[in-house]
Image: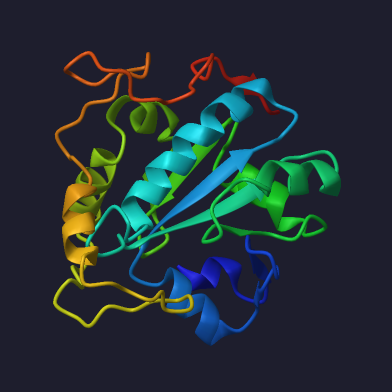
């Protein structure tokens, strides 16, 4: 997987904009993971409607506030924004664990052509080998929520690392004696089946601001 970005720089979406610019660092963040390539643009209304859904999806799988162990998942924002300022504004409220390509890197456009992205938003799901698992998971994410990951994990035959010691790519967070109870309370409910209107099977509002995310913007 890291070979797809060999010789390139990826940037972490944190306040320091840390660069991931060595082969070892790329490998540590991308190998043996499902990688989501998120093609989007801040100027696209459909993308703005879908972004909070994807943010919630990612956080519920990778934030230890919700899960006992972060999923083997990485997300790279492949900006289709017309200006660097719009790219910055779009990423401002997105998770710090997201990665993105520098605005002036032509790979942003090359990846769109390579994976035949025709409309925005689009989420290409890649296996750890770099092969395409799903050419566009946008509708699936909106419909099923975090349960998508279990399906992808099985289809990709992803090596389960739950028997290994936890690895935290960021600074460790102080933990309290009540944390295991708090984590259990907020674990992802994999039985939830999100529908497009943002309701689960019980009819309750999921809080997903999907808007008109079902409509898609033509890219090429």
How many numbered badges does the structure rendering display? 0
Residue 134 seen in the figure: no
Residue sitting at x 46%, y 72%: 29
* 214 up-or-down from 152: above or below: above
Residue sitting at x 70%, y 57%: 107
Residue 11 seen in the figure: yes
Tell me where residue 44 appears, x and y as whole percent. 69, 26
* 39 up-or-down from 19: above or below: above
User: In which quadrant is the C terminus drawn?
Assistant: top right
Residue sitting at x 67%, y 73%: 18
Tell me where residue 202 appears, x and y as whole percent. 16, 17
**Which image quadrant is residue 151 in?**
top left
Q: Nearer the viewer, residue 60 or 76?
A: 60
Is 170 situated left or right of 185 in this image? right
Q: Nearer the viewer, residue 57 or 102?
A: 57
* 112 up-or-down from 167: above or below: above
Residue sitting at x 45%, y 76%: 169
Is 109 situated left or right of 40 in this image? right
Identify the colour scheme used: rainbow
**Which image quadrant is residue 82 in?**
top right
Tell me where residue 87 appears, x and y as whole percent. 75, 45
User: In which quadrant is the N terminus drawn?
Assistant: bottom left
Tell me where residue 32 appears, x and y as whole percent. 33, 70
């Amino acid at each position: 997987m890291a070979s797809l970005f060999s010789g390139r720089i990826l940037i972490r979406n944190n306040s320091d904009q840390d660069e991931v610019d060595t082969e070892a660092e790329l490998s540590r963040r991308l190998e043996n993971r499902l990688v989501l390539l998120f093609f989007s643009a801040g100027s696209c209304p459909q993308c703005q409607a879908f972004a909070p859904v994807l943010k919630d999806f990612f956080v519920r799988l990778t934030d230890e506030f919700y899960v006992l162990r972060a999923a083997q998942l990485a997300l790279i924002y492949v900006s289709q924004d017309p200006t660097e300022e719009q790219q910055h504004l779009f990423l401002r409220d997105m998770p710090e664990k997201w990665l993105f390509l520098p605005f002036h890197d032509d790979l942003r456009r090359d990846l769109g052509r390579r994976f035949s992205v025709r409309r925005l938003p689009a989420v290409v799901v890649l296996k750890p080998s770099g092969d395409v698992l799903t050419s566009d998971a946008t509708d699936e994410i909106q419909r099923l929520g975090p349960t998508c990951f279990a399906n992808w994990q099985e289809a990709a035959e992803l090596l389960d690392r739950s028997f290994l010691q936890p690895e935290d790519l960021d600074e460790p967070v102080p933990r309290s004696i009540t944390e295991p109870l708090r984590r259990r309370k907020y674990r992802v409910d994999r039985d939830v089946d999100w529908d497009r209107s943002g309701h689960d099977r019980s009819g309750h509002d999921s809080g997903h601001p999907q808007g008109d995310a079902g409509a898609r913007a033509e890219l090429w």
